[in-house]
Image (cartoon, grey):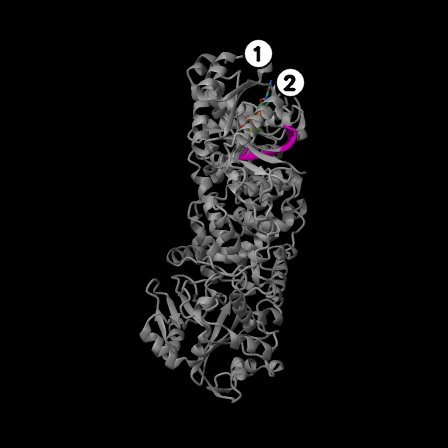
Amino acid sequence: MSYAYLFKYIIIGDTGVGKSCLLLQFTDKRFQPVHDLTIGVEFGARMITIDNKPIKLQIWDTAGQESFRSITRSYYRGAAGALLVYDITRRETFNHLASWLEDARQHANANMTIMLIGNKCDLAHRRAVSTEEGEQFAKEHGLIFMEASAKTAQNVEEAFINTAGTIYKKIQDGVFDVSNEASQSYGIKVGYGGIPGPSGGRDGSTSQGGGCCN
Amino acid sequence: MHETDIHDLSDDADYAAASKQGSSSVTRSDSSKRSSSSEPEDAQIVYLKDNVSIHPTQYATERIGGRLKLIKQGSSLVMTWIPYKGQSSNPRLSEKDKNLYTIRAVPFSDIQSIRRHIPTIGWQYVIVVLSSGLAFPPLYFYSGGVREFLATIKQHVVIVRSSEDANVFLVNNFQDPLQRTLSSLELPRSLANGTPSSSFRGSPSPSDNNNQETQLDTVNTSGSGQQNNNRQRQKTQDPARDLSIQVLEKFSLVTRFARETTSQLFRDSLVDGQGQSQSQSQGQGQNERRRNNWASKDHKPLEMAPIDAPIAPKDVPVPSDPLEFDKLSLVWGKPRQHPLGVEEWSNFLDYEGRIMDPDALKKRIFYGGVEHNLRKEVWAFLLGYYSYDSTYAEREYVVSVKTSEYMTIKNQWQSISPEQAKRFTKFRERKGLIEKDVVRTDRSLSFYEGDDNPNVRLLHDILLTYSFYNFDLGYCQGMSDLLSPILFIMKDESEAFWCFVSLMERLGPNFNRDQNGMHSQLFALSKLVELLDSPLHNYFKQNDCLNYFFCFRWILIQFKREFEYDKTLRLWEVLWTHYLSEHLHLYVCIAILKRQRGKIMGEEMDFDTLLKFINELSGQIELDPILRDAEALCVCAGENGAGLIPPGTPPALPIPEASMYQQQDDEVL
Ligand SMILES: Nc1nc2c(ncn2[C@@H]2O[C@H](COP(=O)(O)OP(=O)(O)OP(=O)(O)O)[C@@H](O)[C@H]2O)c(=O)[nH]1
Ligand SMILES: [Mg+2]
């Protein structure tokens, strides 16, 4: 599978907000309410197309529980995009957004694109956070915002793809220097179909000289 | 008690020498000498000690007795240790096995240091560390004589006591210029053999490999004489080499040949080594571990010969050609047995239902696990809900008492009214979290499948009750994963609860808020990998992977997500025996990593890639080979490994008071 770019995404937010369900809806197009809770991190991937270019999204679905935070923080490194998720039916998951954001700002690279998602919008009758509040928070913190439902798939595609679009635009605008290896620290890998660059390095069999580096 | 016929080996100079018991002069006893000098030289035995033994395994029946000698040959001193022939408490120890450990004429110019262990209880022993960094297995002096041994050496070779550790004697310590001069006078051979020192400071350099080979040949009686001797001559020696003590005590000399033999030993010990001697040697293991704890404090092994390397000396050391290693199977622990069945189980019980030999039981389960229909009963013992010496009647009583105790605790949260809950945030939060998680725990299993499944309800009730039983710890994600198999086996709510309580006594620290329980295990893991696979360790170091977060899930929930459900049950009962180590799970981690090391390093995985790779191993790992590897690694790491695991690292339990001195009966002294 060749791609022009590979973007690393992370999904963060309180436990139970539906991060894993969003990922599954995006990668497998199904809603699976009885899957296991996440411990550590799980992975998903999907190809999308932007500007006629194949782009691979590698998505890290992290565990939301507070006590795993010290571990989760190590996953931020080198993410190009983040989906910050809360549950519109649980106020506290919205209240915790600031602390998630702080983590992201501290441990991810500054140019990471963050998409705020108010999930479970199919449960409108149990809504505890209004759309306006979500919009307001996003505006204040410079995030893109969407309400979505992993159950009905509403806005799920859009959330992932719009994020990719924003990242792609940043590349076009030269925010990221993707011409060299440094791009990886932005969570972007240039693939075969993209700008020629040092991709792979798998068969770069460096002949061993021996113990120069003790 | 020991001298027997050795003449069938009389074509071998050392055996010939050994047969001349008590004689003070031997001719041409040093095989390496033969090649270095065409002139036969007179040799003189300057020290001879009988009843010096090697313990290849922890089993008392597999100890190999022999004779230790120091032989003066011209200007050099050589050491030999020859096992007694024929005499063995274990007829299964073949001569071949014994020959494996034979030390045939090691010149002191090849020895870096000697470490002396004088435990308050137990035999004195020494560990001879070669300049290559490898070590011979400990030599136990059943009839004392360590002091005399060292004194004799001192008469012939320059040895100095290490300034860091009074029990370490450095041989050929060239750091002091004065000594250098002295040594050059006394040990002309070592200088003649010396090569420029800078060439092999990095660990896996070709010359190191050579050293290993040479040294292996020294003990490998099947090796052919001349060729080896040539190699021995070429052996490089680095006076400036770090004098770090590198000891892989028990199985440091594992060649492919040795490995086969070792598994042979393992296989054999399946049949015997049970019963009393078993429990005694376990006690001793405990004691040795404690001993080693202090020792390792100031002398941590800096780099260890990778146990992979000696498999085939021709193989390039790891990082340069990691793919080679995928072809080599690490399997060399004991073959797995069939699970413990009902009939065999009944033999473990006396007429009132006490388990007569808990250690034998644990050993049996360690190697084979338990048949499914027996698990409910046996797990209760393994987890400590039942005590091994309880009778049927006592257990019945315990169950009834514990059931009502459980109901009392459960009632604490059941009696919280909605009004009260409104003002009890912590309760509401915990309950909410548990409710959210039990519906996301093993729901694809028929036992937990479907809406309103009563077992899901039980998971909920037990976890919430536990969060009251242990209010400080409360509820954390991962606990439902640990409880699920227990409830699945125990079926009964109260019994599952108490078994879970026991398990959490060991694993509770995994869920500490500050993650210190997890961090201490990950730290111990990194130390063990450093010990058992230094190239892999260096790789992780260079690639910023030393936090071992990629093993987080493995350890947090004891591989629950890595194996199929029934394999997890098997793995857990094996881990719970604490048979070889209470930290076997760390060796399981290493076993899995080792099987993937070629891929990891070959594909130059960075942290992200590695994490993903490890995650995707889930469901791909075969349990039995991993268990065998883990067993072997655990044995291999021995006391050094145990010493690297900080006290209190989960799932450590308090040491039962009795077991510390159990080994005394077994002592000769
Ligand atoms: N109605 C509705 N329920 C949802 C939706 N998304 C998730 N859920 C439910 O919310 C629960 C939690 O979803 P998960 O995806 O496991 O939550 P998570 O954020 O991954 O949680 P952690 O892995 O613990 O961090 C599941 O049991 C789903 O059934 C949604 O869009 N609508
Ligand atoms: Mg999840």
The answer to which of A184 and B181 lies nearer the viewer is: A184
> Tag on residue B70?
none
Category of crowding for the residue at label 2, using alpha-carbon neighbours closer than 10 angstroms: few (below 14), some (14–19), many (at least 20): some
Q: Is residue A47 magenta?
A: yes
Category of crowding for the residue at label 1, using alpha-carbon neighbours closer than 10 angstroms: few (below 14), some (14–19), many (at least 20): few
Residue type, numbered disc 2: Thr
The answer to which of B357 and B66 lies nearer the viewer is: B66
> Would the CB of label 1 be found within 8 Å of ligand 1?
no
Q: Where is residue A147 in the image (x, y as percent from the top left)?
A: 56, 17
Which quadrant: the C terminus of chain B?
A: bottom left
- Secondary structure of the residue carrying tag 1 is helix
Which residue is tagged 2?
Answer: A152
Residue at the image position 45 percent from the left and 40 percent from the top: B517
B625 relative position to A116: left or right: right
Q: Quadrant of residue A24?
A: top right
The residue sitting at the top extreme is A125
Q: Quick check: can you spot residue A130?
A: no
Q: In this view, does A123 lie above or below B24?
A: above
Q: Position of residue B531 (x, y in %)?
A: 49, 55
Q: Are marks 2 and 1 on the same chain?
A: yes
Q: Give the range drawn in magenta.
A: A39-55
For marks 2 and 1, the one nearer the N-term is 1
> Would the CB of label 2 be found within 8 Å of ligand 1?
yes
- Secondary structure of the residue carrying tag 2 is loop
Q: Quick check: can you spot residue B119?
A: yes
Which residue is tagged 1?
Answer: A124
Residue at the image position 60 percent from the left and 83 percent from the top: B10
**Secondary structure character of the magenta stretch overall:** strand
* Chain ID of residue with mark 2: A
Residue type, numbered disc 1: Ala
